[in-house]
Every structure is written in structure tokens, then in C-alpha cells.
Amino acid sequence: MVAQDFSEKPFSSLQIEPDAVNPAVPSAIKTTSLWWRYPTFSEKAGAWTLRAIDLDIKQGECFGITGPSGAGKTTLCRALMGIIPHTTRLTKEQQPHHYRGQVDILGEPVTPETATSHKIGMVLQDPENQFLRMSLLHELALGLQIQGVSQEEILQRIYIALQWVGLQKLWHGALYLHPSDLSGGQKQRIAIAAFLALRPEVLILDEPTSDLDPVGKREVIETIARLRQDYQMTVVLVEQDSDILATFCDRIALLHEGRIQLQAPPAEFYAQQDILERCGASVGELARISWLTNHTYQGRPPLNLAEAEAAFEPVIKQRQLVSILPIATPTTQAEAVVQAKDVIYNYGDGSLALKGVNLTLYRGEMLALLGPNGSGKTTLAKIIAGIYRATGGQLHVFGQDAARRKVRSRLPGSVGYVFQNPDHQLFCRKVSDEIEYGLKNLGIDARKRRIIVEETLEAVGLTSYADEDPLFLSKGQRQRLAVAAVLAMGPEILVVDEPTTGQDHRSILGIMSLLCELQRQGKTILVITHDMTLVAEYCQRVVAFRDGELSFTGTPAELFNSVEILQRTGLRPPAAAALATRLRARQPELPSLLTAQQWKEALYPFHA
Amino acid sequence: MFHQKSLYAISEEAPYLQPPPGRRYVRSFLFSRRVDAPVARVHLLLRILLVLCLSAAQLRAMNMTPPDLVGALVLWIPSIAIFFLSGMHGKVVRIYLLLILPTMVSLFLSWTVLNPIAGKMVFVQQPIYPGFLTLSLAVWQLIWLAVVIGYYRWKRGIVNGMVLATIVSIILSYLLPLPSWTFAHIPLFHPLTIYISDQGLIMAITKVVSYSGMMLLTVALVVTSRDIELMGAMRQLRIPNPIIFFLSTVFRALNLALTDFETIRQAQIARAVDARPRSFIRRLRDLASIAVPMVAMMIRRSSEIGDALLARGYNLRHKDVDFYEKSPFRLLDGCVLVICLVLLYMAVGPYPGLTALFQRWW
């Protein structure tokens, strides 16, 4: 059975070797025909998570790994660390049924001691889960304490590590800094510093930026750049963000259903449109514009704005460009569903999360709430949903005063709130019970509940899972179930918190098409997001927060086309809009283009 | 241990041991405390010992016969002083005082009313329970049942029906001589009398003073302590490394669990859990349903925490070194130790109590 499994499905993977990689450079990581599948609790063996993985990562190389959710990226990282199979408690007899192949780190086979050997370090996706102590000083020192390094040397090494990640300003008072005093980006950089202090030769970064806001993302990216430039460390970077991969990696591998489908330097990697589209890999906006318009830079999609400028400048000079109609914005004639006037929210310690916010929401619009973490956007959304009570000001939802307790307690029936992590909002042991949970709370009778549950499951494609335990659904299914459970309550306003964070391209498309469908049905959608591409593509209006105040209210075009507003809000435009802005400096007649699709429509109006 | 350079002496030279500029509060087990809280300057082990000894002395004061009210009041002064010197945020102080106040009032009332103690002066003496249960059938009971059933059929409500039935039964029993038939008397417990004497009041006040002091002390201890201090104290007590490391990870996991709990509770509110008035049982079930996402989160987190531990090189056999965890003992700790010994004598030594001593002197 095992032999049969190993010989299944002949497949071909495309491997393009870069000129820069010298074969004489010794390997940092080498895997030879690596197979792995997780043990199951039933007689039937599970599917292979990793299939015939062959990698040869050279010392000093920055090697990117990308692929859709569930492709096996994190499992591959665990296998490179030796966590798989050595901590899975498989017996010698069981092991061949689950693990085959060879992994070598720095020329030596991976053993049970590799994970704890400090040759290799791994930074995980969620910065919270890897912050193991309650003070910054002890967090940085943990690995060295375990190694038995002297106090003086620990101090020296952790200070240098902090300098490497650019956080030496936190050195003063490191003993008193609690994890909750740090931002997500700082926590992730501390995690990197904690490994740097151990002086590993290989560092694996498993989606280190996916849970961070743009500020945190930028901080971590700058740190990775420094690791590359100054310390020539071997870095394995697992990432969905194609811009990061293209900027920092020497080579990128595409993992799909446990197999390496493509392995190439960034320029050649993003030229493989067929493979990338087939596997649902995330690609940057510039590559997408190139694919849609067939304009390339040196025969391949541009990887950065300078290349894109060089590729598109001659084109827009030659062509008569068609101006694009902006996305229709709701007029003030549309019914106002939420009216906030001077809304204030005070944290328990006296600090203000909202300092007098004025905002009107109109029926049927999709509105983006933008701003860095802690700027007040989530607080306002929770006040609208009745989760928090405003400390001051007035908030009317469908004409009712949300300051009244009775109104607030009934708000979930008209304002639905979908949290970022589906695992925080699934309370029942059956999928159908989960949908029914909110309906019961609203006092809907049993007969009507049954009908709504059936309809909702049908709408989100989970009917066949009605009796399953939500915990055993995939992350994408859990996310849909969380949305469905809120939708079943029939809200007229839906607040969705970070719907695309950590999701692959296909999942993002799935979620956004569901939200667009709800908007077509007349529902008002509020999206809390850091994803500017999503804002440009789907939202009619934008509200930007900064330090508890509104720094901008208007359309995405007004936001992304104005350098002054972008500076005021601290936001960055999506690549498509940034390219248009740069080119407009030379071609003032270039219309406002915010998305890849708009670029296509502007350049090829008849094809579009 | 004693010849180590003091943490406070080192901190003057080392910026990493000083509070961040402008920072007034630091996180502790619960909430936070002022960076320069006076109580936090005492070694954690001594703080624990002080709380134990002071509590033991307070227990002795209230269990003496007659109760040592003067002793309890004198011991209450350091308790309240420690509470206020713990560096707790003013808002947290108010919350705890507000929580403790009704507890103490109910303790005072229940002790005064339900514990008859003979005294020189008796203020109230009223029997309320004869010491046996009477099995009987009365017309008022039938009226009560009929009203409850009738109300349920009319309004589909139970609680309001019971209230109405009780009012109707009392009024009718008062106005009309309703018959009743007694079948048996079953002895249960002992007769209860509301009996308030001067000695009963002294006992109740002593209990309230002592218990409130003990509560404030415990809160102060928990609020001022940081996990790092506990790790260091355990190292000084030579507790095995795996236990110390396990506890340290548990504290961090609890911190994450609290954050998760907050989000999950908000997710419940977003699913209309507060939309309608709910029975107590239903509220308990709502609270229990939080366990499902909590467990799911903890399982997912524990897997990542395990990976993070392995990646840092953790294994059960490791012997790590101390790194600014152990806190050296200082002169102040020596003074606290002396106070602890005095308190220990007051708790277990041949000591008649401060009240008796005062009575002897005056």
C-alpha cells in the first residue's frame, strides 16, 4: 500500500536554476524525495501532506516558499526543523507508513536533536504563540539560558540581536516590558532576535508577516532585508505576499497539494502564469496587470514599480487611454443606517480609543475601515455592533439610540459582526447547531429556525457537513461557517474584521464574492482591513482612522490619488494605483487607475 | 545568596533593569502595579511569609475565647497598609474595596443573627426555627398551587405566578381562618434563634476585621507579584527546572487564554447572547459553551507553543542558568523576617491576646 502511494500520479515540476546560484556553494538544506502524512485515529491512512519534495537550498541563500492554504508549507517547515517525524511519537514500524526520504541540514541528516540544536531556528506565523516569557529581557534570553551560556554573554548577545532587528530602543526597561506592551511587528522582530541571539545558520520564517498590520509588516520586512544584506544568513521565507518574495528571495518554490510545482528565481517564477493560476498562488498586482495587458518588462512581468514604469511608459505614450468610471458611491439620498455623532470611547485606564468620531453609513454600500492597529477602527465597529457601549456622543443604528441597553442587546439581529479568527466564534459541536445558536438567542421559533438553517447551509455550501463537528472542518470551511452563522441572523449590516488576513488568493476571492453578493441583496458591508488592493477593488467608500480620530472619509480614488491624504492617513496605495500615480507625473492625461482590471479597461477598452 | 550584588544596585547601572522612561506601572499576575511600589521591594518569599504569618495571627485573634478584638484591629492596620502600598492602580483598589464591602456586611449580618453567643447584654432574642420540620396540609397551600397553575396557563410564566400566589396566600391567611392538618414533626438541625448580644457583636466585628484584613493581604500579594519573581524564588528554593519552566509556560498560556476569553465573550454578544432575558441555568450554559472555542484555541496554540519551545532548544534534560530571575535577600527582607517571627509567636505562641493584655494593664 505504501509503495503504491509513493508511485501515484506521475507529475512534472518546473525547475529553473538561476545563474547567480553557484553549484559549488555547499547546501544549507537538502531534501531528497521527502514524503510525509500525519497519523490518523482511524484504520484508514490519511492523504500525503508532502509528496516527493526535492529541495537544495544553498548556504547564504534566501529561499521563498509560497502556495495556497493547506498546501503543506508549515508541515514542510516542521520537517526541515526535524519536528516531523521526530516528535510525533511514531514507532519504527509505523514510521515508513508516514515518513520517507531524507532531510540534511548543513550536510548532516536531521535527527531528533536538530530542532533543539540551534543550527536552525523557526519564526512562526502568530507572534503571540512564540512569546514564551512575560518580559522582553527573559524572552530574548530564553534559548541562551537553555544552552547554559553565562549571564555576561547572554546580555551581550541579546543586545546585539536587538540591534540587528532595529529594536535597541526597547533595551531600556527590557525587564519591565510585557508581551502586551509590544505591537505585533515588534513581537515578531523580538521572535527573530531571540533566534539571532542563538546564532543559527539557517532561519525559517513561516509567514512572519501575515498576522501583522502594514506598519508591522514593513518593520519585519526591513529586518529580513537586513539579515540578507548584512549577515548572509540562510533564510527560508514562507510567504503569500509576492512583493516580499520577489524583493528578497533568490529563488521561490511553489508548493501545491504537497508537491513542489515550480522552483525558479523571482523573475522567471512570476512569468509562469499557467502554473501559478492553476495552483491558485498569490501574485502581485503588477504581475496581474502584466498578465491582463500582455505588456512585460524584458519579456516577463515587472516585479517592482521601477520595472513596471519602464514597461508601461512607452505603452501609455502610444495609446489613447480611456478614462475609467469610478465605482459608484452612495449618495446622501440613500437611507442612512448608522449615524455616529461625536462618539467617544474610553478604555478602562482613562485613555481614549475614539476621540469624537462623526460618521454616517448608507444602506447598500461597502465601506472600508482603515488605519493602523490601535487607531480605533475595530472599536467603532464593535460599538456599531452593540458589543461595546460608547462612553460619549450619540450613535443611532436604524434610528435607534445605541446608548440604550435594550437597543444594544437586540443589535446583533440587525448588525452582524464576523471576527477575524473563526475559532473564536464557533460555540457548538455540530455545524447545524452553530447556525441555530444565534437564532435561538433571538427567540426565533423552532420551525422557522430549521428552515433558516437549511437555507443558510445551502447558501454557503456546507449542507453535507450539517452534522459534522466544526472543529474538524478546514480553516476555509470554518471561516464560511462563521460568516454563515452571523448571516443566518438576518443582519442588514455586516461587519467583517480582516477577512483576507493570512488567506490565499482563492480564499480571498471566495470571501469577497460572497460579500459582494450580500451587498447586491441590499446589505451594508463594513470591512476592517489593511489590504489596499481589496479596498480599491471592492469598496465604494473609505474611512481612515488615526489615533482615535477620522483622518479621511471619501472614495478610494480620492484617497489613493492624493499624496497629501496618503501622508495624512499613513496609508500606502495598492501597486496599481501607485504605478498610475508615478506615470501620471509624466503623462498627466493618464486617468485614475486603482486596480489591475481598470488598467486593462484603460488600455484595451474593447477587450474588457 | 546574600553576597550577590543587589538587583536594585545593578539596575542603577543597567538600563535593561530600569523601568522604561515615563513608565509608571508594570504587569503582574493580576492587573498591574506601580514600578516603584514599596511592597514590591520586599523579596517575594518574604512577602508570602509575611502574608501567611499575618493571616495566621488574624485567625488566632478571631478564634480566641473571648475574641481578641484589639488584636484584630491592630493587625488590620498593617494589612490595610500593605494593601495600599502594593502599588495597585486606584481604579483596581476601588473595585476590590467595593467587592469586599458587601461580603463583609453579609458576613457580619449572618454571624450576628445566626450565632447565638451568651453575653452580659442581650439586644434581640427571637426564635425563628423550632428544630423540626412540620408535615402538614393547609388550605393556603392549595390556594397557592391553584394561583401558580392559573397564572401559568394565563401568562406562561412561573416566577411571577409564584410571587402572586405567595401574596394571595398571605393575605387570605391573614383575613380568613384557613384550616390546616398536621401529620408529623421531623427533627432536623437544631432550633434557631435570632440572638444578638454584646459578645456576639464583638465576635462578628472581630471576624469582619480579620477576614477583611486577610482578603486585602492576599489581593496585595497577587497584585504585586510578577511571574519572573516567582521563577526566581522557585530557583532559590531549588525546585526542579522542568517544574519551573512548566509553570512559566502555564502563566504565559493563561495570559493568552484571558485574551482569547475576552474575544470569545464578545463573539457571543455578537451572536445575540444578551438579546433576551435568560434564566440562571441558561446563563450557565452560555458560559459553558465558551469552553468549546476556548479548548479549540488552546489546542491550536499549544501545538505552536510546543514548536516554539523546541525551536529554542528546550528539552526536559536541560539545565538552564539564572538570568536576572533570582532576587537577592537584603536588609529590608531581614526586618520583614523579624516581623514574621513576632507574628508567628502571636499566631501559635503562649499569648493571651492584645485585648486581654490591655484589660490587665488598665
Image: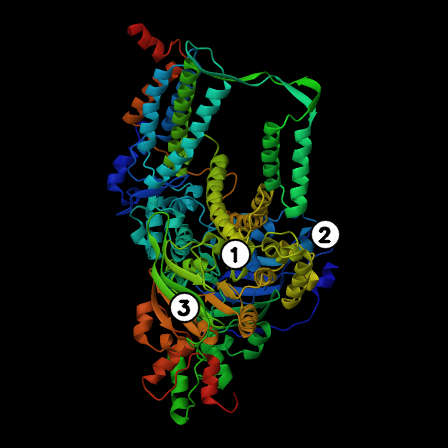
- Residue A566 appears left or right of B193: left
- Residue B265 appears left or right of B46: right
Residue B232 appears at what percent x and percent y?
Answer: 40, 34
For the question of whether residue A98 can be seen, the reply is yes
Residue B327 appears at what percent x and percent y?
Answer: 34, 33
Mark 2, chain letter? A
Q: Pick whichever, A390 or A20, lies toward us.
A: A390
Q: Nearer the viewer, mark 2 or mark 3?
A: 3
Q: Earlier in the sequence, mark 1 or mark 3?
A: 3
Mark pair 2, 3: CA separation: 55 Å
Q: Which mark is residue A42?
A: 2
Q: Secondary structure at mark 2?
A: loop
Marks 1 and 3 belong to one chain:
yes
Query: Residue at the location (69% across, 59% down)?
Result: A447
Query: Residue at the location (68% across, 18% down)?
Result: B186
Query: Vertically, is A237 above or below B87?
Result: below
Residue A263 appears at what percent x and percent y?
Answer: 54, 71
Q: Name the residue that disc number 3 marks.
A: A360
Residue B284 appears at what percent x and percent y?
Answer: 58, 42
Q: Secondary structure at mark 3?
A: strand
Q: Secondary structure at mark 1?
A: helix
Q: Earlier in the sequence, mark 2 or mark 3?
A: 2
Q: Quadrant of the N terminus of chain A?
A: bottom right
Query: Vertically, is A15 above or below A88?
Result: below
Mark pair 1, 3: CA separation: 20 Å
For the question of whether residue B329 can be seen, the reply is no
Query: Vertically, is B357 above or below A90?
Result: above
Query: Residue at the location (38% across, 10% down)?
Result: B351
Mark 3, chain letter? A
Mark pair 2, 1: CA separation: 45 Å
- The amino acid sitting under disc 2 is Ser
Q: Name the residue that disc number 1 marks.
A: A410
